[in-house]
Image: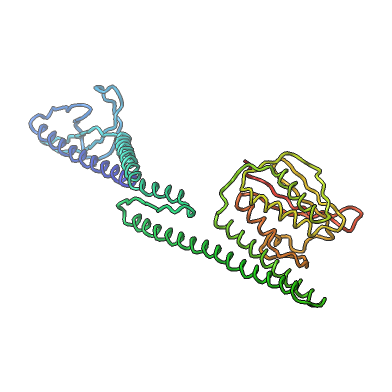
Amino acid sequence: MVISGVVLFFSIKILLESEIEEELYSNKNRVEVILKSDPEHQGIPPVIEVEKVNRDQQRILNDTLIYDPLQDEIELFRQLSQTKLINGQHYKITVRAMVIESENILVAIVSTFLIIILLAFLFLFYFNTNRNKKLWEPFFINLNKIKSFSIKERTDLNLIDSGIIEFDELNKELKALTAKVYSDYQNLKQFTEDISHEIQTPLAVMQAKIDTLVNATPINQEQYQQFTSLENDIRKLKNINKRLILLAKIDNNQFTDSQFISINELFQEVLLNFKELTSIDYEIKHSEELTVKMDRSLAHVLANNLISNAVKHSLKGQPIQINFFENRVQIVNSGNSELANPEQLFDRFYKESTKRDSNGLGLSIVKKICDYYGFKPSYSFSELQESTTGLHTFEILFTKLL
């Protein structure tokens, strides 16, 4: 539109100049006809002027500024001056025509185009806004339905038709995809439950048979140690199985019974249970009240795994330190040196300890629980002054309190 406006401006300007020149030549011819019958004709100033001259002069076509008494201002005229021999006398005939100023033409064109552009913009904006709103409304309705879809609740994804081929094909594929995801979820859930039951039963039978064999049959010391080792391996396998099932349940979002839990009371309860089984001591240096909303069974697992890890790896005779702050809890235990790969500490089955009762799943479960609720676990090591030992600090930042 800008380019066409420029082209239109110059086209109109050239056209007007051509028309004015054509009018000038026409008026000049009329004056010549009048002079043949009236040699004393003086013209109509400033539009037509006639004067007698002694010789023939060159034709001049140009623009000039002349005061117009009727308009009482100086106006731009296009004028044609030419001599003509009439009845033996040279006459200089000057005819003029007022020129429409280019600025006026430009203002008119620009104003017209701006009005057209504004009206077109308002129309297209209103039309496109309403049209797009109508076209995209089914899409956003379906999008909200997809956001509220839960794989744990068997609810069909009832998407509305939009009448648009692409959206309807997308709805069809989404329905098929969610049905497949739900089917896979149910199969995985069923597999988890079945494998839990199927593994626990033969392990329990194996342990019972070992107990019966040890109690009913005379065995020597070496055989007793082998049976004891076998029982420990079975117990360890059962423990790994339970923890893997727990990880699978967390992944499948099967813990939805959230409630307000006092982290202070929960950790102290777990500490008392460990104190009854081991000779470990503990101390609490900071005891601010800390309450978190989460599933109680997962909170117990979280506290149990953190304290169990500290008990297993703390130096003999050194107490475990628990610190409760406004939005975080710290578990500190003594150690000889910093971990070699602290960035892998929360990875599944990763362990640096050589102890047989460590399976590398405890801290992985801690990380999984924290990810489930949006908490942030971290680890740090600090060396003690004038000592070859240091302190391992595990911290849980409860970023989504209450």
Q: What residue appears at the point 61 percent right and 59 percent down from the top-left corner?
A: 246
Work out which residue is located at the far left of the displayed protein and give it: 37
Residue drawn at the location 58% of the way across and 68% of the way down: 198
Front residue of 17 and 175: 175
Considering every residue shown, the one lying at the far right of the view is 386
Between 378 and 361, the one lying in front of the other is 361
Q: Quadrant of the C terminus?
A: top right
To which quarter of the image does residue 252 belong?
A: bottom right
Q: How is the image coloured?
A: rainbow
Residue 211 occupies quadrant: bottom right
Q: Give the answer, above or below, for where 311 lies relative to 92.
A: below
Image quarter of residue 391? bottom right
In this image, 270 relative to 183: left or right? right
In front here: 95 or 105? 105
169 w.r.t. 201: above or below = above
User: Going 68% across and 52% down the picture, which residue do you hit?
Assistant: 302
